Amino acid sequence: MVSAATRPGNRSVYGKVYLVGAGPGDPGLFTLRGKGLLECAEVVIHDALVSAPILAMINPQAAVINVGKRRGRHSLNQTEINQLIIEQARLHAVVVRLKGGDPFVFGRGGEEMAALVEMGIAVEIVPGITAGVAVPAYAGIPVTHRSQSSSVTFVTGHEAAGKYRPKVNWRALAQGSETIVVYMGIHNLGPITTELLAADLSPETPVALIRWGTYPQQETLIGTLQTIVDQVAEVGFEAPAVAVIGPVVSWHEIFGHCRPTGTIWP
């Protein structure tokens, strides 16, 4: 494959960028479209939570750049990542920006797409399975259920500074959704549960925390709004984890052993 930088007379021509969702971790949940792009990519720019088996699918000749962000440890800020993607599109014909989960669900894919479109760079979105659906499923928890929950809200528990509004209105969510799925909620779990209780949610409302969802080491901690913070402190439960709040969590006791089989973890 001839890169954009080596096309005769076309040094200013940009390649194409693919914003690819890697899914929640299990390589069996990665899309065929995403796998095909990794196999022909010239450069892959990936996040921290992309699993090793998915990274192993990358073209051996491709340059691989880790720009992963973990709490308190950012190799590059988002503006720098945007610029890096643009620079790589100037040098290569096929650039894959590989993001955990789905690029448009708390993945900053919208910000990266906007930066690329502004520069006139061709970009394509390849959706991935988001953790808010897959991780509860692997714990035997349906996020909706005809007899218990006809609504579900996906919300981040870790908000960016300087964002468009000051904070999530947890009290409104408590009254407006029967299931609440919280991404990145472990570090702010105390304030979140306090707000939900203040909105008159029952202290007995079930809560599930699911750590390393869809990975072989997946762990689930079950409690209630009243007990879960103390449980986290007692067992040292840590991120990365998804929280599920609502009556559907009770299905874990029945379906928790029904973890999907046939995955292709090495």
Image (spheres, rainbow, N blue to C red):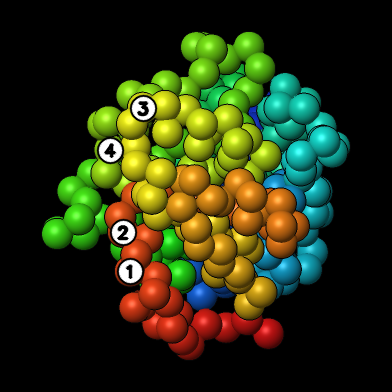
Q: Which amino acid type corresponds to the residue marked 1 in the rendered image? A: Trp
* Identity of the residue drawn at 49% across and 46% down: 226
Separation of marks 2 and 3 at Cα, in angstroms: 19 Å
Dot 3: what SS? loop
Q: In this view, does 44 lie above or below 158?
A: below
Give the mark nearest the N terminus, 3 or 1: 3
Q: How crowded is mark 1: few (under 14 residues within 10 Å), some or many (20 or more)?
A: some
Give the mark nearest the N terminus, 1 or 4: 4
Dot 2: what SS? helix
Q: In this view, does 23 lie above or below 123?
A: below
Separation of marks 3 and 1 at Cα, in angstroms: 24 Å
Q: Where is residue 57 in the image (x, y as percent from the top left)?
A: 66, 70
Q: Is residue 27 above or below residue 94?
A: below
Q: Residue tagged by mark 2?
A: 248
* Identity of the residue drawn at 41% across and 44% down: 203
Separation of marks 4 and 3 at Cα, in angstroms: 12 Å
* Image marks 2 and 1: residues in contact by CB distance under 8 Å: yes
Q: Which amino acid type corresponds to the residue marked 3 in the rendered image? A: Ala
Q: Residue tagged by mark 4?
A: 177
Q: Residues within 10 Å of mark 4 (few under 14, many from 20)?
A: some
Q: Residue tagged by mark 1?
A: 251
Q: How crowded is mark 2: few (under 14 residues within 10 Å), some or many (20 or more)?
A: many
Q: Which amino acid type corresponds to the residue marked 4 in the rendered image? A: Ser
Give the mark nearest the N terminus, 2 or 4: 4
Numbered mark located on residue 199 in the image: 3
Can residue 81 be seen here?
yes
Q: Position of residue 43 (x, y in %)?
A: 73, 51
* Identity of the residue drawn at 27% across and 38% down: 177
Q: Which amino acid type corresponds to the residue marked 2 in the rendered image? A: Val
